[in-house]
Amino acid sequence: MSKPKNVVVTSRIARLLVAGMFASTAFVGPAAAQDFNDSLLAYAVNIHRTPQQSWPGYGIYLGRGFFLTAAHVVGRAWLSWPKVVIAGQEYPTQVVKEGSFEGTDLTLLAVEQNLLPIRLRLRRSSLCDTPPLPGQRVVTVVPEGIAQSRILSADRLPEGTRKFRTVIADVAYTGNSGSGVFDAERRCLLGIMSRKISRSKVDPLSRRTETQDIAKYFVPAAEIAAFLPPNSPF
C-alpha cells in the first residue's frame, strides 16, 4: 500500500495555512434552506488531469485558494498535472498534499487566489465538528447540481465492507468521486466522496452474476481535518 506523501509547499501557501483557511458557515432557517442549498453549488468544481480524463472529476472549494478532492481523481499528481475547472475555465494548481486511494483518499490543491473569480474568493467552507449519524439528511454537491440523501448505517453493508463507516444511500443520483457531502441542516462539509460499495448476486433465472450498487463511501470530516496540514483551524 502506498503511503500518503507530502509535497513541498511554497512559503506563501504555508503562511496562508497558518493564518487560516476557513470561517464558519452561517446557519440559515428552513425558509431559506433551498436558496442556501443552491448556493453550495459555488463550492463545487471539476478536476481535470493532463491530458483530460474521459470521466468527470470533482472537487470542493475550501477557501483562500484551496481545493479538496479525492486522491484517485488526481492520480499521481507529478504525472497528471491536475487543474481546477470553474465554469469551463481551467486553473493550474500546486499539489499541497497528496493521499492515496488505498490510504486516505484525499488530495489538497492550491490555486493562486488572485486568479479565481471574485465570487469564489470571498467564500469559505467549514468542516463539521460532529460525526455523521444514520438517518441524517445530507446533500451532495457537484457543478451540475445538488442531490439529497441520507446517512446509511454501516451495519447494512455487506461483510468485508463495513470498515467504510461513513456512507450514503441513493447511489444513482448523488455526486461521484471528489464531490462534497454537506450536512443538510448545518451546511458544513461532512466529507468528500470516495467510492461506491457494491454487492454481487446471482439472478435465479439467468444464473448470471449481477452487481448491485448499494452505497457510497465518503472520507469524513474528522479524517479530512487529520489529513490537512498542521495549524489549519477547524
Image: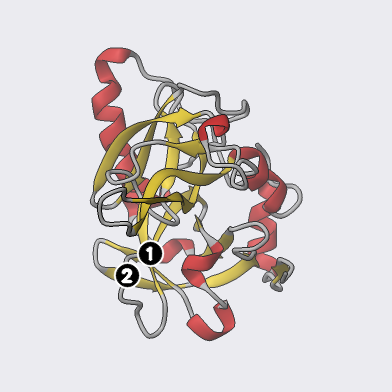
Q: Is residue 138 left or right of residue 20?
A: left
| Relative to 175, residue 108 above or below | below
The structure residue drawn at horizontal position 56% and vertical position 36%, both measured from the top left corner, is 127
Q: Quadrant of residue 89?
A: bottom left
Report x, y in % for residue 196.
Answer: 45, 52
Q: Is residue 25 left or right of residue 21?
A: left
| Relative to 211, residue 127 above or below | above
Report x, y in % for residue 198.
Answer: 44, 50
Q: Toward the viewer: 192 or 167?
A: 167
Q: Nearer the viewer, mark 1 or mark 2?
A: 2
Identify the element where label 2 is drawn: loop
Disc 2 residue crowd, few under 14, some 14–19, many 20+, Cα 10 Å: few
The structure residue drawn at horizontal position 60% and vertical position 42%, both measured from the top left corner, is 159
The label on residue 12 is none
Q: Name the residue at the top extreme.
A: 30
Q: Toward the viewer: 157 or 66?
A: 157
Quote the CA–CA distance across marks 1 and 2. 7 Å
Identify the element where label 1 is drawn: loop
Q: Which residue is mark 1?
A: 57
Report x, y in % for residue 123.
Answer: 42, 43
Disc 1 residue crowd, few under 14, some 14–19, many 20+, Cα 10 Å: many
Quarter of the image with the N terminus in it: bottom right
- Contact? badges 1 and 2 (CB < 8 Å): yes
Q: Quadrant of residue 88?
A: bottom left
- Residue 111 seen: no
- The figure's colour scheme reads secondary structure
- Residue 163 seen: yes
Quarter of the image with the C terminus in it: top right
Q: Amino acid at mark 1?
A: Gly
Q: Which residue is mark 2?
A: 55
Q: Toward the viewer: 21 or 2?
A: 2
The structure residue drawn at horizontal position 62% and vertical position 47%, both measured from the top left corner, is 160
